Image (tube, helix red, strand yellow):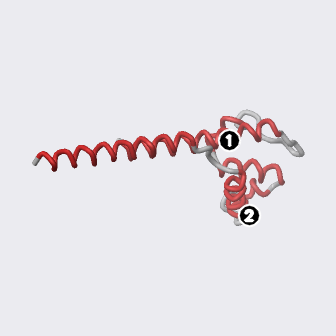
Amino acid sequence: MMAAISTLIVLMLALCVTCADLAAAAVHYTGISDKELGERKVRCYQDIDNGLWGNSCKASPTEKENCALICVSPTCYDSVYGSDPLEEGEVDLRRGREFKACIRGQMQGDRLARAKSIAF
């Protein structure tokens, strides 16, 4: 009987350590890579080209880019570009980096929440 209880305690401790490692790994994950972001944008461009976002998104390259950014992450688009969308011919590297950082934070938060739900 005592051996069974000891084995159960060891298994429970091992499970706790595994869950803690899973949560820690989620915290250290850097988020979306440039490749993943590019792949998402390509899928969004395809949806725009197929008319799923309406004709206004096809009106100009800049409108298409704004729509693609919204498609990738409406929350991050609103946070970074919402009050001042890209204008024709504008290239804003600073806001582009902010957008990517926002997405990384969003994904990291999502992964952390999933890891916590698994661990607890």
Q: Is residue 72 above or below residue 42?
A: above
Mark 1 vs mark 2: in front: 1
Quadrant the C terminus occupies: top left
Report the residue at 70% width, 37% height from top: 82
Horizontal placement of 86 versus 18: left or right?
right
What whole-number distance in Å separates the C-alpha atoms at marks 1 and 2?
A: 20 Å
Q: Amino acid at mark 2?
A: Asp
Question: In what element is the residue under mark 1?
Answer: helix
Give the residue number, with chain letter if any, for mark 1: 77
Q: Is residue 52 above or below residue 107?
A: below
Residue closer to the observer: 66 or 115 = 115
Which is more N-terminal, label 2 or label 1? 2
Q: Badge 2: how crowded within 10 Å, few (<14), some, or many (20+)?
A: some
Horizontal arrangement in the rendering, residue 15 relative to residue 69 (left or right): left
Q: Nearer the viewer, residue 45 or 98?
A: 98
- In x, y percent, where is residue 77? 68, 41
Q: Position of residue 12 (x, y in %)?
A: 28, 45
Residue nearest the viewer, comparing 70 with 109? 109
Q: Amino acid at mark 1?
A: Tyr
Q: Are marks 1 and 2 in contact (CB under 8 Å)?
A: no
In the displayed image of the protein, which residue is found farthest to the left? Answer: 1
Q: Secondary structure at mark 2?
A: helix
Q: Quadrant of residue 89 in the image?
A: top right
The residue carrying mark 2 is 49
Identify the image quadrant of residue 74: top right
